[in-house]
């Protein structure tokens, strides 16, 4: 039996950052992955989708040549990611074990011929797509993001079930790959939870790229019919495509043997306290498996925070209300804090202001034609939210969460220098343009 300070179960972003952070604090660490390193975020979800979309930015006229180049090099590119992750972990001194292991008890985990003992254990096994209702995933015709990112099997026509972030990002990817795309969203709006003025430019661009968007009607059934697959909507309409991408539901990847531990959980998650510990004091659950927020940057933050809690007994600090987030489409949408519909629902009195990138000095210099900043603040001046739509706006929002957490006011922004000429001046312009 090999003894470790920390056993980490899972090989995604939460596990990766937790393992590296624990090693930097001098802890002996083992990471166990049942299949391939990288998890959803790096191998089959967020990062690959962003790479595909980035390939087309500013080069839409070369769409076919970009597509051929991506197909030719895609598997090699994904393999290079796996190699980087493995090299980073091994170089830092993390011991890697591959195989579908299981808990033996509260401290021991079996994988292959190895029995590993951990003083602390971190569960970072994530979630995976699941079938819903009469729509059963077969991973061939009715697929998940794992198959959707396989560029060796690009369909001519795809039906995407779900106008959520995943569905709309894949719609953008496939439209730029020249695929005929239909999006089916049972709600009245796509990208629910976001203000209409932020979503409209994204939806307009999809329609411009010939994506058909059906809203307010859910999918009742999907089934294969020969070489094609058919989707039946709740109103009886039937659509036919080469593949159906399901983005509607996910289920937790509970590690084998967890029932031996009597860890508190429900059907969707492992239950944790404010320090991401389970009811067993030395066992933690981080990332999607704890059900707090299914976002990669949340998983990263939790992985680092737990290593600090184990090594330094530092409380896990989390402030998710000001969490920056982004939708990687054409154009992108990104920001942090409240949106208008949140403020209206909570009855918070607010003021809003807009500034278009095309009206800024740097926007003129860069010939930017689209995109804007929307700022929301309380009548007392407290900053409530900053949101942007435009190309690459996800790159601008890193520090926004900190600004909101520190209760920055619009006067604080006005009284500090913003370098000229930059697109960040649009934040100041949006404040100046706001109606008081």
Image (tube, grey):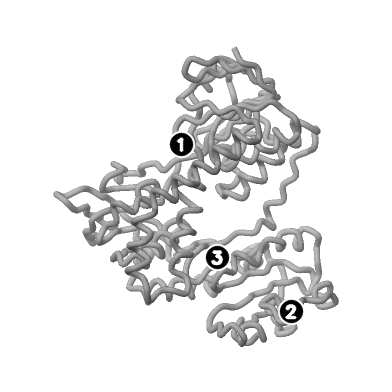
Sequence-wise first label, 1 or 3: 1
Q: Position of residue 22 (x, y in %)?
A: 70, 33
Residue 335 relative to residue 171: left or right? right
**Other residues around mark 2 within 10 Å, as few (<14) / some (14–19) / many (≥20):** many
**Which quadrant holds residue 275?**
top right
**Which quadrant holds residue 396?**
bottom right
Residue under label 2, please give it: 428
Indicate the secondary structure of the residue bearing disc 1: loop
Residue 175 relative to residue 236: left or right? right
What numbered label is drawn on residue 194? Answer: 3
- Between 424 and 245, the residue placed more toward the observer is 424
Residue 299 relative to residue 223: left or right? right
Task: Determine if residue 305 is in view.
Answer: yes
Give above or below for 240 relative to 12.
Answer: below
**Other residues around mark 3 within 10 Å, as few (<14) / some (14–19) / many (≥20):** some
- Write the residue at 80% across / 73% down: 413
**Other residues around mark 1 within 10 Å, as few (<14) / some (14–19) / many (≥20):** some
Q: Position of residue 237 (x, y in %)?
A: 23, 62
Q: Are marks 1 and 3 in contact (CB under 8 Å)?
A: no
Mark 1–mark 3 distance (CA, rounded to whole Å): 34 Å
- Write the residue at 34% across / 57% down: 71
What numbered label is drawn on residue 36? Answer: 1
Q: Position of residue 96 (x, y in %)?
A: 55, 28
Q: Are marks 2 and 1 in contact (CB under 8 Å)?
A: no
Give above or below for 168 relative to 375.
Answer: above
Sequence-wise first label, 2 or 1: 1
Mark 2–mark 3 distance (CA, rounded to whole Å): 23 Å
Q: Nearer the viewer, mark 2 or mark 1?
A: 1
Q: Nearer the viewer, mark 2 or mark 3?
A: 2
Q: Position of residue 77 (x, y in %)?
A: 44, 51
Sequence-wise first label, 2 or 3: 3
- Write the residue at 70% across / 24% down: 281
């Amino acid at each position: 039996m090999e003894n470790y300070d920390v056993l980490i179960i899972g090989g995604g972003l939460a596990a990766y950052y937790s393992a590296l952070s624990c090693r930097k604090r001098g802890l002996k660490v083992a990471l166990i992955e049942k299949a391939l390193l990288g998890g959803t975020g790096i191998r089959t979800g967020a990062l690959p989708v962003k790479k595909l979309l980035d390939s087309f930015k500013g080069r839409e006229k070369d769409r076919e040549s970009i597509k051929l180049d991506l197909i030719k090099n895609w598997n090699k590119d994904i393999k290079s990611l796996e190699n980087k992750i493995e090299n980073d972990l091994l170089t830092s001194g993390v011991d890697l074990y591959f195989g579908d292991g299981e808990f033996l008890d509260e401290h021991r985990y079996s994988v292959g011929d190895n029995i590993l003992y951990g003083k602390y254990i971190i569960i970072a096994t994530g979630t995976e797509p699941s079938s819903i209702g009469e729509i059963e995933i077969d991973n061939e015709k009715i697929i998940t993001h794992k198959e959707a990112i396989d560029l060796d099997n690009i369909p001519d026509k795809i039906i995407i079930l779900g106008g959520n972030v995943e569905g709309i990002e894949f719609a953008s990817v496939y439209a730029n790959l020249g695929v005929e795309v239909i999006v089916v969203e049972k709600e009245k709006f796509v990208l629910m939870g976001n203000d209409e003025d932020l979503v409209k430019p994204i939806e307009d661009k999809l329609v411009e790229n010939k994506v058909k968007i059906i809203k307010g009607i859910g999918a009742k059934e999907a089934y294969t019919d020969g070489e094609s697959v058919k989707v039946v909507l709740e109103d009886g309409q039937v659509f036919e495509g080469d593949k159906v991408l399901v983005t509607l539901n996910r289920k937790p990847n509970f590690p084998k043997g967890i029932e031996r531990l009597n860890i508190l959980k429900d059907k969707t998650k492992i239950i944790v306290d404010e320090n991401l510990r389970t009811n067993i004091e030395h066992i933690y659950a981080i990332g999607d498996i704890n059900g707090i927020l299914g976002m990669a940057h949340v998983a990263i933050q939790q992985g680092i925070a737990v290593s600090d809690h184990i090594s330094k007994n530092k409380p896990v600090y989390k402030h998710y209300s000001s969490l920056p987030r982004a939708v990687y489409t054409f154009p992108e949408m990104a920001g942090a804090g409240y949106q208008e519909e949140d403020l209206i629902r909570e009855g918070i009195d607010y003021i809003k202001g807009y500034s278009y990138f095309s009206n800024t000095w740097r926007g003129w210099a860069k010939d930017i034609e689209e995109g804007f900043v929307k700022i929301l603040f309380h009548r007392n001046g407290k900053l409530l939210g900053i949101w942007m739509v435009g190309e690459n706006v996800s790159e601008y929002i890193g520090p926004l969460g900190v600004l909101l957490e520190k209760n920055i006011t619009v006067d604080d922004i006005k009284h500090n220098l913003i370098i000229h000429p930059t697109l960040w001046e649009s934040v100041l312009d949006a404040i100046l343009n706001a109606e008081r």
